[in-house]
Structures are given as C-alpha cells and as structure tokens.
Amino acid sequence: MRELERRFPRQLAVVGVHSGKFIAERETARIAHAAARLGVHHAVVNDRQFRVWRSWAVRAWPTLAVVDARGYAVAVQAGELTADELMPLVAALAAEPAMAADLPTPPAPAPPPADSALRYPGKVAVSAPDADGVRRLAVADSARHRVLVGRLDAGGTRLTVERVVGRGGATSAGTGPVGTGATRDDLRAAADGPADAATFDNPQGLAFGTGAHAGTLFVADAGNHAVRAVDLATGAVRTLAGTGARVRTREDRRAGALASPWDLAYAVVDGRPTLAVAMAGTHQLWIVDPATGAASAHAGGRGEDLMDGALADALLAQPMGIATDGRTLWFADAESSAVRAADAAPAGTVRTVVGTGLFDFGDRDDVGDAARLQHPQGVALAPDGRLLVADSYNDALRWVDPATRAVTTWQRGFHEPGGLAIGGGRVWVADTNAHRVVTLDLDTGEQAEVALT
C-alpha cells in the first residue's frame, strides 16, 4: 500500500479497516501506537465489532477491496498482494474520466515526541562482561531506524551511549533502490557503510557475538528483510543475509531473500557458531552462518498454525522472539500465543510448552494447556532454566517453566513490551509503546527506567 500511495499520491486513497483478532488489538490507543510505529499515515478504522468485516463478507486477514471513483467495489481479494500486481488495475482506474479531481494532499506524519530518547524500541541485547567487568547494552531504536550501543553502569540503570549506528532514516522509505527483485548487492549498496551513513528499516532483534565474533553485533533488520552485522570497534555495517526484498518467488529465494526476520540468538551449536533467526514473515526458524551468511530454513514453513512434529513438518505462527542455550531454540510464537521449543540439531523436533492454537489466547496463570498468553513477542532464558516471556498484549512479564509447563505472572504495568535480555542478575525490557527501556532485579523484581546519556 505504501508503494501504491507513493506512485499515485493524488489519485489513490488508502483506508485501513482494522478488525482485530486479539482483544488488545481492538483498543483504539493501541491501534494508534501501531500506526505510528509502522509509519502508517492513512486513515484507519477501528472495526472492533467486525461490522465492516461482515458487511464486506471478509473471511481472512488481509483482504483488499478496490473502490472506483464512482463508489463501486470493482475488486475484492484475500491474501498478500504486491504493488506490481495491483499496478495495472489502479493505473486503469486512475485514468478513468470519473477521476475529475485530484484527492487532497494527505497531512504530514506527526513528529516523534521531542523529549523521547527512544522511539518504539523493539528489542534489547546485553553482552557478557568484558575484562573490566563492564557489560554493554544494545537497543533497537526501531521507529528511528537505528541501533544504540553503550556501557552500562554497575547497577544496570544507566546506559552511556558509545555509538549510534544508522543515520536515522529508513533504507528505502518506499522510494529507494531496494524493492521487488532486489539482490544482496542492491541492499549492500543502499544500506551498508560507516555508522553515520548506514541505514536500517525497523531493526528488531539483536545479538552480541562471542568467541571469533566477539566484536560483532548482529541485527535482525526486519523492514529490510535482512540480517546485518555491526563491527563494534568501528560501527561499520554490512549485510550478512537477505536482499532488502521480501521473499515471494523461487527467484527471490535463489537470490537469498528473507521475510521479516524479527529476532535472533547467537550460540555455538555442535562446535559451530550459529545465528538462530525467528523468521516471522514465513512462520519459520532459520539458521544463518555468522561467518559466511549462508542461510537455510530450520523449522516450519509449510503454513501458519500450531502443530508439533519433526522440524520440517511442524507449523509455526509468526515467531517473534527467540533464545537458545545451544541445544534448544526457545521461541515466542506470537500468532498462536504460544511458547515453543525446537531442537537446534537438524534431526530434531518442535514441541509446544504453552499454547493451544491460533485463536486460543487470554491472560491466565496455570499449567500447560490451561494457561493463556496473548501475542508474546520476546523470550529470554534465565540462569535457572526458566523462560521469561514478554507477554506483549497483556502488558506483562510472565515466567514459563519448560519442565513443569507452569505459567506465573511476574510483573505488570508495561506497554506492549517487545524484547528482553538477561545478564548479571538483571533483566532489561524494551517497553515498546512507552518509548523506554526498563531494568529489573531478577531476585527482588525492583525496577527502574534506564537513563540514556
């Protein structure tokens, strides 16, 4: 839609009708946050009671309806379509005699809060302590399309920003060279470079490398459909995997295209450094070689659902958070409101810890199938083996015990938290819709907002 709006700025009006699946998605304030976070500037209707959905006989997300200048619906299509596929129809309608007058120019987008150091931070990562005992924290300043890296104080409550990576604008902003049919070289030419010149597009997951990759920060560049690498010594950014275009065709796949990588975790698996990627756009987990960029699907990919089984046969539903101990890939399966596990070994399986289906969600502490989450987006592995989950649409942090399948609420009062990192007895939370990072003591639960200096 953004590309069509760019091509037909005075002939096409886009109206989003938001019929929310999750209860939290039916709140107007949350929809406004999502529009601001994603750079959506056209009108959005909150169809919270599904009245528009029913009147248009909609059966699936997304569904597109095209209305001509006379007010007639000339096409209705379910499923994801590209701008190129819609171009002939929109161009023909824009040329009709009924298009007697241009549409008014849309208003400019609202500026970010002037007093906010961050703008919808999506994920965080914390490093192991260096020789001086200092940890570093990386923050995906997602809506400003940049990554911040700095030193934490001894208490973990103050971040001295040492490096801002990314010039602060999206790589293409809908008008650049990266798009359908792009290659990795196209993305590298458009987005790689020194810290103050390189670009991202809605960066999300972050992971500090170790060992041979101790000087590298890996970034899940969701909007560019790529995995990027930042040299922490210089701030230089290079593209490791992905082309800048979302994978849709066999040609895209052969070119190395990915689809909305949302989180990643670095670990050594069977003696080999490995990046595990939560590939939200294709409902899969992927493995990327941090040295060569070679990328391959690891689990899921034949549809969207909650179904356990062998890695290649299991079905996932928009994984958006991932953590690993080198043996198991723990992931937050957002659309099924589930926490699941996949073996890191290639001959393994996928199994569900908590969650029962695409339309089973809620806010309930319990055990196994009786527990309920609502669109979790972050997961972190604690030293005692439990999983801390950012239960995003419940604005809460929940403990999930993989051994007993027990779910217990730890902390509330957040605003769609999207990412977590644990280290040194503390947890850091990307409190996305509050434009802040919060830290908590793992033992006491005492929390404080992290100050950026």
Image (cartoon, rainbow, N blue to C red):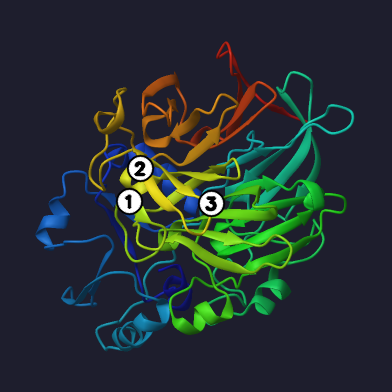
Q: Is residue 258 visible?
A: yes
Mark 1 and 2 residues: CB-CB less than 8 Å, in contact?
yes
In the rendered image of this protein, does residue 438 appear above or below residue 10?
above
Q: Is 298 placed left or right of 97 in the picture? A: right
From the viewer's side, name the closer residue of 66 and 156.
156
Secondary structure state at the residue bearing disc 2: strand
**Residue linked to disc 1:** 308
Q: Residues within 10 Å of mark 3 (few under 14, many from 20)?
A: many
In terms of sequence position, does the residue under pointer 3 or pointer 1 come before the other? 1
List x then y, in percent, for residue 1: 40, 69
In the rendered image of this protein, does residue 298 appear above or below residue 451?
below
Q: Quadrant of residue 56?
A: bottom left
Q: Amino acid at mark 3?
A: Ala
Secondary structure state at the residue bearing disc 1: loop
From the viewer's side, name the closer residue of 288 and 328.
328
- How far apart marks 3 and 1 lie (CA) works out to 15 Å
Q: Quadrant of residue 441?
A: top right
List x then y, in percent, for residue 374: 33, 36
In terms of sequence position, does the residue under pointer 3 or pointer 2 come before the other? 3
**Residue linked to disc 3:** 344
What residue is rendered at 72% in x and 68% in y? 292
Q: Amino acid at mark 2?
A: Thr
**Residue linked to disc 2:** 352
What residue is rendered at 45% in x and 42% in y? 377
Q: Amino acid at mark 1?
A: Asp
In terms of sequence position, does the residue under pointer 1 or pointer 2 come before the other? 1
Q: Quadrant of residue 425?
A: top right
What residue is rendered at 74% in x and 67% in y? 192
Q: Is 318 placed left or right of 238 in the picture? A: left
